[in-house]
Amino acid sequence: MKYFYGILAVLGVVLPYSQFLPWIIQNGLDSSQLMREITQTRIGSFAWMDVLVSAIVLIGFILFEGKRRGMRFLWLPIVGTLVVGVSLGLPLFLLLREIHMERKLQGRAQ
């Protein structure tokens, strides 16, 4: 699963930014235009509201599950979620959790 989550984390950066970077190159950091385009259609607003709620839920899950398991580096998937989105934050957290659980099992085996 580590490799699966790792690949998805990479894709979670590459795919969204393959669409966002050309927009930035064309429009610059025009936040008012970005907001206009995001809310221009109901389906666009629907998608962004879905992403917003998903990001809030994910950050809560990262904090709760990460602290419950005694994980370190919880800030990484939170920053990933805020900078890229759920497409990076979730697989990155699951990768970190998988590594953490693997290390705990190795520690018990010794």
Image (tube, grey):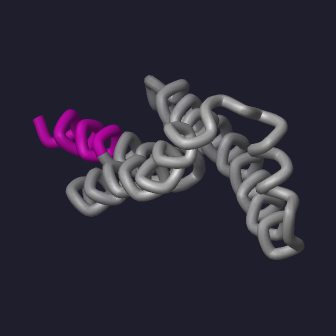
Q: Is residue 103 magenta?
A: yes
Q: Quick check: 29 left or right of 76? A: right
Name, please, the residue furthest toward the bottom: 43
- Name the image quarter holding residue 40: bottom right
In the image, the segment drawn in magenta is: 99-110
Q: Is residue 42 left or right of residue 75?
A: right
Q: Position of residue 52 (x, y in %)?
A: 77, 52
Residue 7 place in picture, x, y as percent: 27, 57
Residue 43 x %, y %: 81, 75
Q: Is residue 24 left or right of residue 2?
A: right
Between residues 73 and 85, which one lies in front from this camera angle? 85
Name the residue: 34% across, 38% down.
100
Pick the quarter of the image with the C terminus: top left
Residue located 77% across and 34% down the image: 31
The percent position of residue 104, horizontal first and vertical second, equals 29, 38
Residue at point 72% right, 33% down?
30
Residue 96 within the segment the image draws in magenta: no
Q: Residue 68's quadrant in the figure?
A: top right
Position of the N terminus by quadrant = bottom left
On screen, 32 above or below 85? above
Q: Quadrant of residue 54?
A: bottom right
